[in-house]
Amino acid sequence: MRAKRSKQYRKLMQQYAMSFGFREPYQVLVDAEIIQAAARFKMKLGVLLAGALHGEIKPMITQCCIRHLYDAPTTTDQERSEKEGWIEVAKQAERRRCGHHELDEPLTTLECLTSVVDPKGSGKNRNCYVVATQDQEVRQSMRRVAGVPLMYVNRSVMILEPMASKSEKLREMEERGKLKAGLISRRPTGAGGKRKREDEEEEDMPDRARAVIAAEADGGVRGGTEPAAKKKQKVKGPKGPNPLSVRKTKKEDLKPIARPVEEERATSRNAAKSKPHAVEKGVDAEGDAEGGAAEGAIEATKKRKRKRKGKGGAALEGEPAVEGEAADKGELPEEGSRGVEGMIS
């Protein structure tokens, strides 16, 4: 609950600062009764006031209030010691001259504080005083003055009253006035009274828009400055691969065999430009050479090593085997071969 109360007090003082001009250090007027209440609860009055207002304070006391402390009746030694403590606390505060020190008897707290806060009876707190008092009549009277924060002690807790109804209404009116001043332009309409709709639109238009419209009108009618050229739109096409993700070609990957081939192709191209008929003959010759090479490769693939069969039908290493055509015709090896005898037996 303490944190919530502290947040409310901070927000309240910000409202007083924005609407009524309060600033640090806050001028706090204390009376005799709140000093006595703080001493009764053994409270440090200055620390609690600064904590409730969330800022530096400047405690002040009027001459009438300090005279009330001096005139307090005492009968016992304990009361006398308490009275001395009250006076010491009052002396730490700044003396506010109210002009009533010449009177034989001091004025009441209500009369004295009212003459200090609102001397002319205008209903406004022009000097931005914060009133800290235990007197209910004083607080009730100060609520009629706009912009007066009120404080009092309740069971050893420093209380800052919410904003009074008169202060709240004045703050709302000021906020509405600021809003209207920002939305509605206060330009004079001129001697003619009402303005045309086109003139109003031109006045509400920003300066840059006016300049653009004037330039277009000059270019179209008077032949003055040409309108600004339109920006060329970039033609979007297929994007290439990411250069960081593409594998770089190495010199080792380039085969040395490809170099003479490339050189031959380059020479043929150059020859084609100079002598096209000679190039055609060379192409035919290359085609014949390539065809012969292809036939030689096919014949090489057809040739296979033959293995001769030994005992038990196994082929011997280094000897050719019987071709499939001879086996189909029924041709067998010579009669004297031991391999045949082994097969017959």
Image (tube, grey):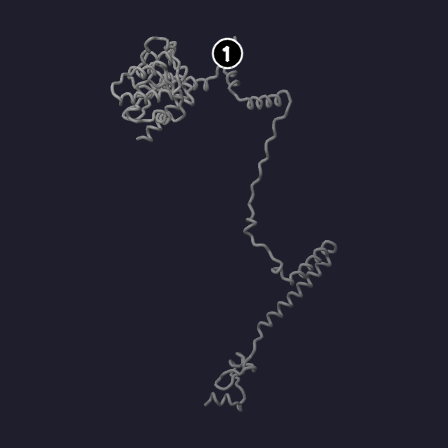
Q: State the quadrant of the C terminus.
A: bottom left
The percent position of residue 190, horizontal first and vertical second, equals 52, 10
Image side of residue 335 versus residue 168, left or right: right
Identify whether 170 is placed above or below 157.
Answer: above
Q: Residue furthest bottom?
A: 336
Q: Work out which residue is located at the far front of the displayed protein and give it.
A: 77
Q: Residue 64: which quarter of the image?
A: top left
Residue 108 visible (yes or no): yes
* Foreground residue among 198 and 331: 198
Is disc 1 placed on a helix, strand or loop?
A: loop
Residue 299's image quarter? bottom right
Nearer to us in this view, 96 or 241: 96
Q: Quadrant of the N terminus?
A: top left
Residue 121 in view, yes or no: no
**Amino acid marked by disc 1:** Thr
The residue drawn where x is 34% and y is 20% is 87
What is the count of numbered marks?
Answer: 1
Q: Position of residue 88 (x, y in %)?
A: 35, 22
- Picture coordinates of residue 9 (x, y %)? 35, 25
Residue annotated with mark 1: 189
Q: Is 339 situated above or below 11?
A: below
- Classify residue 209 by image quadrant: top right
Q: Residue at x 48, y 15 (%)?
A: 186
